[in-house]
Image (cartoon, grey):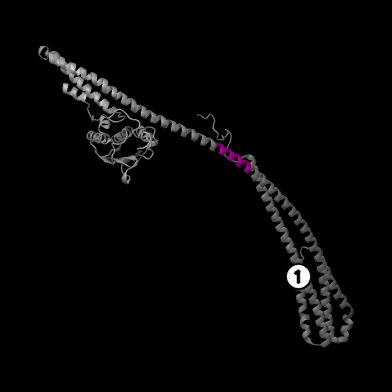
Amino acid sequence: MYFTSDPRPRRTRGSSRSLPRYKTLICLACVLILLANGFSLLRNLDALKAANGLQDQTARVTDELQHLSLLVTDAESNMRGYFLSGNPSYLGMVKGAPGQIDRKLRELQVLLAGHPSQQKNLAQLRTLVERQLDMMNQALAAYRAGGLKEILTITSAPNDGDSDEIRLQVVIMLSEQNESLTAHSAAFYEQYRHAVLLGLGINAAAIAVLLLFYRLVRRSFAARAEAECALQAANEQLESTVAKRTEQLSVLSRHLIHVAEEEKARLARELHDEMGANLTAIGMDLNSVGEELRTSRPELAAMLARARATLVDTVQLKRRIVEDLRPSLLDNLGLSAALQSYCDDYARVTGLDCDVLIEGEIDSAGPMHAIALFRIVQEALNNIAKYAGARNVIVHLEREADAVALEVSDDGVGIAPDAFARAKSHGLLGMRERALLLGGKLEVGRGVNEVGTCVRARIPLSGTGSGEETQPALPGPNESSPVLPATGCDNKDRDLQQLA
């Protein structure tokens, strides 16, 4: 099954990895709205600060005016007390009043610097106060000169009028100050109301922008989730297809291994029967003719001797081919003898120290199990000879309750963790497929203490291949190994060697 289109969303050629323009504009709008809200808050803060300042100023002006009025009133009261009692202690307040009154007037001058109308009222108040103080000084001088009758003549009428004017002027200034405070408070309230309305509008705009942005984000998230679901579905379909194809290829590989074993057994049988019989007949004929010509035609007898030597070499070649196709010891004497003989020949050819440890009844395994285990050992030993650089090899075969466990370990350079994933690991893949063919498993990893390589296989004895499918007792394949010495010889070969 092939996919003609990619379900994943593709970017257009002109697309970029930045945010879309409308999302950028929405973000800028949010920033501008927040800046406007902050500016409005600053203006409100300044207006509140001004209102608070005006209120404080009004309170201070009120206090100063009342204090000033109190000073004038106290000075008058103390002077009258002095006139009535003659006690000089009353004159202390009268003498200190001008300085205190002047200080209060200067403070009022500073407080009312920004109010022209109040400045005029303050000037008028200053005139009235100074005139009242002059009147009090004149009355004091007249009292000291002429007594109480003179005081009454000088100060009776004007004194009461100036005091009333001073109090009236203070009341006027207080009223004007309160009116100014009331006007400014009304202006501040109006400004604050506008600011509140503006803030509510800004908040409403911000909420609208956030809702729009949330809608866009939700739509984008939904589109992304839909794309991810489509991609996941496509990946699952692709993984299912790949797993199905892998299983099909694995089944085909195991079938080809099985067919190859059968074909090689058939070929070995034909070579063993047909070619062996023909070679034996040719050898017997050559031997008979050679005996006849040995005395009469010695030169022809010598030619026949050379032909017999060539025939012997051909018999040896045929025997090696048959042994490579299927070891005869495997079917005649069992798996233990075949492995022991092969490992002995392997040690003699390669110069490595190869030990075979067999535990339990191994020869009771079926033909398919025997040939599979033999081929796995054969391939593992050939890989060690080619790539491991080892000096010692141990082949351990153990019969368990319902399975056969195989372990081939060496002390070489070791194997890469991704050996099975490499493109040319046909030998390792072949070993694994042979184990899987019989329902077993095969693992390849580091040896003991991370030294060398260890091939571990475990093949169950029950189920497929446990003896139901039998093969003729003929030699089988030796797929990737170098040509090793033969491990067996049939009767016809021995007869032919005797003829030779």
Q: Residues within 10 Å of mark 1 (few under 14, many from 20)?
A: some
Q: Residue at x 22, y 19 (%)?
A: 279
Q: Furthest-front residue in view?
A: 468
Relative side of 14 to 365, left or right: right
Q: Quadrant of residue 96?
A: bottom right
Per the image, is 11 magenta? Answer: no
According to the picture, the residue beneath numbered tag 1 turns out to be 106
Relative side of 208 to 490, left or right: right
Residue numbers of the magenta segment: 218-231
Residue toward you, 440 or 393: 440
Q: Quadrant of residue 323?
A: top left
Image location of residue 422, percent across then percent down? 39, 35
Q: Furthest-top residue in view?
A: 296
Task: Indicate the secondary structure of the residue bearing disc 1.
Answer: helix
Residue toward you, 311 or 182: 311
Image location of residue 353, percent across then percent down? 23, 39
Q: Where is the C terminus found, in terms of image quarters?
A: top left
Relative side of 83 to 248, left or right: right
